[in-house]
Image (cartoon, rainbow, N blue to C red):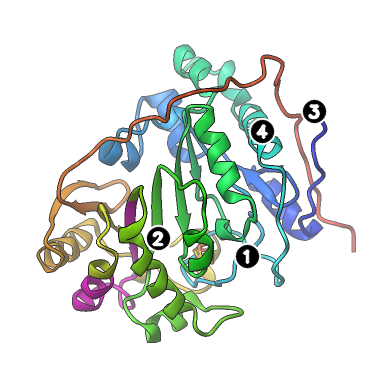
Amino acid sequence: MQSPVTKIDPVIAARLSKQKYQLVGEHGGVKTCHWTKQSLIADRSCYKGTFYGIESHGCMQMAPNVDTCNLGCTYCWREPHSDTLNKIDDDPYELYLESVRGHRRLLTGFGGNPKADPEKFAEAQNPKHVAISLNGEPTLYSRLGEFLDICHQHGTSTFLVTNGSLPKVIENLDTLPTQLYVSVDAPNKELFDRLCKPKFDQGAFHKLEQTLELLPSLDTRTVCRHTLIKHESLGHHKDYARLDNIANPDFIEAKGYVNVGNSRNNLSIENMPTHQEILDFSNTLAPLVGREVLSDRRESRGALIGREMIPVTLPQKVRDLPKDLGIAKPQRFLLPQA
Ligand code: SF4
């Protein structure tokens, strides 16, 4: 299989490479999640295990466009994105195969790690779950629905996280993810514009509201996720309840902002809510949306609000990965010489 060469700006590619991204397709990337590693060596799983039954060692974290986003959120801990919006139309099957090969490459160190569970390591070679939430806005990928379909054909569940600014894309997706997350990270337009900083469309908050209006009609599991910043977006329960009641999602996740990565240029440790503050927020919000707090995870500073906990079921597998798929070559993108 011929791997497409990344078209990511060389400076951004070098930074992502240093952060142990494996670049795939023209603008995509894969990165091993902290919790995938924890599952392999310490039998610990992330909040998705607690809330939805997802096994972290079977999870592949990727995005079709790690260098592209139409927002510039102050709390985004990822590497800053390109200043332009690129056309992303990678072949979905090739992108899936290349992502699995890249994922395998990133896992190689665990093969010889005496702490890693060999059975889990073997299972991790063929992901059971794809978290399309690594970096960038995935609805900017023109063949997203086809990509989701390819994942499902391989018996792989998908969680897709969108910032909700492109409702037409969501509306026209032929295949929906197993679980669709919409980030509702500000309670109103004023805070949205200040915290999420739309780069190209000053009507982005209204577009987010349009996406929320679509959610009740979508035939899939839906989640509104609130990433809460102390002294900024934490609180405002009535405004969040208004938005959540428009979306009527299966679940609401409240999560505390974490002062890591690039967000440290914009926010401080003072902006991190405690787990108790996230629980207090959730307990106040839940009755306003006719739900209850179902679960929480202290390590993730997160709480799940809903009516009942429903584990994810895997899509029916109708296609195997090629037996000779193999593993991607190691990558190293260096900063261009001045
Ligand atoms: S929408 Fe997501 S990827 Fe884009 S800037 Fe905001 S947090 Fe980062």
* Residue in the picture at 38% in, 82% down: 191
Q: Position of residue 200 (x, y in %)?
A: 61, 80
Q: In the image, which is nearer the foreground, mark 3 or mark 1? A: 3
Rendering coords of residue 319 (x, y %): 57, 22
> Marks 1 and 2: in contact by CB < 8 Å?
no
> Mark 2 belongs to which amino acid?
Val
Q: Amino acid at mark 1?
A: Pro
Q: Is residue 256 visible?
A: no
Q: Is residue 285 above or below residue 44?
A: below
Density class for disc 1 (Cα within 10 Å; few <14, some 14-19, many ≥20) is many
Q: CA distance from mark 4 to mark 2?
A: 27 Å
**Helix, strand or loop for disc 4:** helix
| Residue hosting label 3 | 1
Residue at point 23%, 75% (across, down): 242
Residue at 15% x, 63% y: name it. 280
* Residue identified by numbered label 1: 80
Please tell me in which quadrant of the rendered image residue 285 appears.
Answer: bottom left
Q: CA distance from mark 3 to mark 1?
A: 31 Å
Magenta stretch: give its range.
222-243
